[in-house]
Each structure stands twice: as structure tokens, then as C-alpha cells.
């Protein structure tokens, strides 16, 4: 029995990606995902990523309540920093006050007022196809509305990776929040991203809440999400169940439907509008 257990541990260590912790405090833990890429996992299950190039670095999202986040990031990289938000929800934009400038998609500008996150710095709006040149790394912006109107994905084609925020969830995407977008819009984002992954050989999806999954998704996850969204649009989705969590900016009677690796939480009154 002991030998079998040791064999199991050996197999598990080979199959799981090697992630080395490089920094920890009461608010967060930083681990290296791959060369010059780090994941920041916060104590309240939110996620940020740091990508370092030869010339510049990028912080993807800004977490919730992490003291001195700017100083913490400098423990990992001292390169000039671009702070890019995948969308403007508090669990992804909560620490923007530590930075003089942020980048986000203009379609989320309504959330600037709704979310009431204090910020006196500069906001630069980014669009589909914009590229952040970090030197040896180039990170491209893809607009993927659904979870929010301005949700984006950031693609590193050379590394075969993308950083999706909550655009496709972390096993579950929330479509029940205001401002509502039709599932048809989200379906087009799924199709678009699936095509990009196929054509550009993007193998790894780093999601917006990494602590929930502890891995990179592959294209099969996105395909499951596309199929599920399509079934909602066509009216032949698997049986839905009541979703118990009610948020102040969302539907008061949200439902959840699951197929394969994917779940979608939605407002039954706003499926097609």
C-alpha cells in the first residue's frame, strides 16, 4: 500500500504544473506560473497576473483589498508597468488607486459610476487589436463582451497563452449582472475566442479566479461554454436550477445551467435582450 501511495504522489507531481511560490503576505500569495509570468492569488480568492518583458511589465487586474499593491508588484519586477483591467468589477479593479494610470475598454465606462471605486489617476481606453509591447513579449487586446460590455481577453501569441478575466468564467460565467447583455452577444464572443485559439494556437486559458481551478483551461473548456451558450439561445439547454447567490446589481431570480466543464448563470428575463 505504501508503495502504491508513493507511486501516486510521483505521478501527481509529474502531471501537475510546477508552480513555485515567490512571495507571500496576509493579503496575497505570488507564484511563478511559467518563465516571467506570475499569478497573484489573494486571500479572498481574487486573481492578478504579472507578465515581464525585456522592456516593460504588465499587471493584469488589480484585485480587491491588497495593501501597498504597487510596492508588492515591485518585489517581482522593477520594469515600467502597464496596469490593464480585464473589466471594471471591484474584484478586478479594487486597488487601482495605487497606480497613476490604468487601461480598460471604454464599453465598461458605465461601471465606473456603478461600482464607485475611487480613482484620481489617468484612464486610457483600449480597443480590439491594440497591442502592448513589453519588448520580447507583445500582448494583444481582444474585446469579448458578455460578462460585462467591456470585458477583454489579453493574448500572448508567442507563449500560446491568454488571460481572460471573467469573460469566460472560472468554470462558471456570470451573465446575471447589470448592465445585462444578451446571451447572443456572449455566444459571439465564445465563437470568436474559439476561432482565435484554433488559428493562433493558443493552448492556455488563465482565468480570472485562478484559486478556484489551480490550472490553465484549454480550448475544450471554451468549446463547452460556446455549446452551452448556444443551447440557451436556441431554447434547448439542459435543465436549469436556481442560483442561490443574489447580488445588488444583478437579477433577483438568477438561474444556472451546466454542461460539460461549463456553467452559465443568467437572468431568465434577459436571455435574448
Image: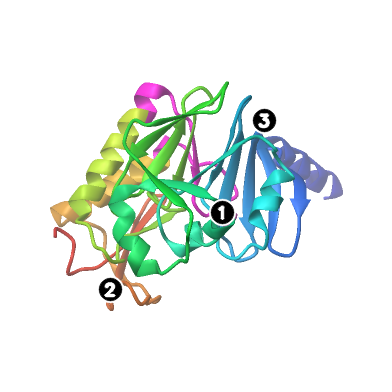
* Residue corresponding to mark 3: 35
Q: Are marks 3 and 1 in contact (CB under 8 Å)?
A: no
Residue drawn at 71 percent across, 35 percent down: 14
Residue pictured at 25% horizontal, 51% vertical:
229
Would residue 257 appear left or right of 181 to someone viewing this image? Answer: right
**Magenta highlight range:** 197-220
* Whether residue 52 is situated above or below residue 244 in the rendered picture: above
Residue 146 in sight = no
Residue that badge 1 annotates: 47
Q: Are marks 1 and 2 in contact (CB under 8 Å)?
A: no
Measured in 3D between alpha carbons, the distance from the residue under mark 2 to the one under mark 3, in whole angstroms, is 41 Å
Q: Position of residue 265 (x, y in %)?
A: 33, 63
Name the residue nearer the viewer: 42 or 67: 67
Q: Which element is circle 3 on?
A: loop
- 10 Å crowding of disc 3: few (<14), some (14-19), many (20+): few
Q: Which residue is mark 2?
A: 251
Q: Residue at x 50, y 62 (%)?
A: 91
Q: CA distance from mark 3 to mark 1?
A: 18 Å
- Residue 155, can we see it? yes
Q: Secondary structure at mark 2?
A: loop
Foreground of the two, 126 or 218: 126
Indicate the secondary structure of the residue bearing disc 1. strand
Does residue 205 belong to the magenta stretch?
Answer: yes
Q: Position of residue 33 (x, y in %)?
A: 65, 39
Q: Quadrant of residue 127?
A: top left
Residue 202: quadrant of the picture: top left
Counting residues from the start of the chain, the first of labels 1 and 2 encountered is 1
Amino acid at each position: 500500500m505504501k508503495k502504491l501511495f508513493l507511486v501516486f504522489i510521483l505521478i501527481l507531481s509529474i502531471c501537475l504544473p510546477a508552480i513555485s511560490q515567490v512571495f507571500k503576505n496576509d493579503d496575497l500569495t505570488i507564484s511563478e506560473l511559467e518563465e516571467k509570468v506570475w499569478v497573484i492569488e489573494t486571500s479572498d480568492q481574487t486573481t492578478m497576473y504579472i507578465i515581464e518583458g525585456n522592456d516593460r511589465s504588465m499587471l493584469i487586474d488589480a484585485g480587491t483589498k491588497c495593501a501597498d499593491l504597487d510596492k508588492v508588484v515591485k518585489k517581482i519586477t522593477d520594469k515600467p508597468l502597464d496596469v490593464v483591467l480585464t473589466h471594471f468589477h471591484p474584484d478586478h479593479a479594487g486597488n487601482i488607486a495605487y497606480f497613476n494610470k490604468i487601461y480598460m475598454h471604454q464599453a465598461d465606462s458605465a461601471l465606473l459610476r456603478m461600482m464607485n471605486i475611487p480613482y484620481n489617476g489617468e484612464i486610457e481606453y483600449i480597443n480590439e487589436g491594440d497591442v502592448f509591447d513589453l519588448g520580447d513579449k507583445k500582448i494583444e487586446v481582444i474585446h469579448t463582451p458578455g460578462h460585462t460590455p467591456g470585458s477583454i481577453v489579453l493574448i500572448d501569441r508567442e507563449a500560446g497563452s491568454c488571460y481572460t478575466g471573467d469573460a469566460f468564467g472560472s468554470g462558471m460565467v456570470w451573465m446575471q449582472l447589470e448592465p445585462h447583455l444578451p446571451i447572443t452577444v456572449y455566444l459571439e464572443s465564445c465563437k470568436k475566442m474559439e476561432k482565435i485559439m484554433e488559428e493562433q494556437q493558443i493552448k492556455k486559458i488563465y482565468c480570472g479566479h485562478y484559486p478556484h481551478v489551480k490550472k490553465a483551461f484549454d480550448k475544450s473548456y471554451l468549446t463547452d461554454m460556446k455549446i452551452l451558450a448556444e443551447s440557451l439561445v436556441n431554447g434547448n439547454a439542459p435543465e436549469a436550477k436556481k442560483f442561490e447567490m443574489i447580488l445588488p446589481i444583478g437579477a433577483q431570480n438568477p438561474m444556472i445551467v451546466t454542461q460539460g466543464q461549463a456553467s452559465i448563470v443568467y437572468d431568465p428575463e434577459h436571455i435574448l435582450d
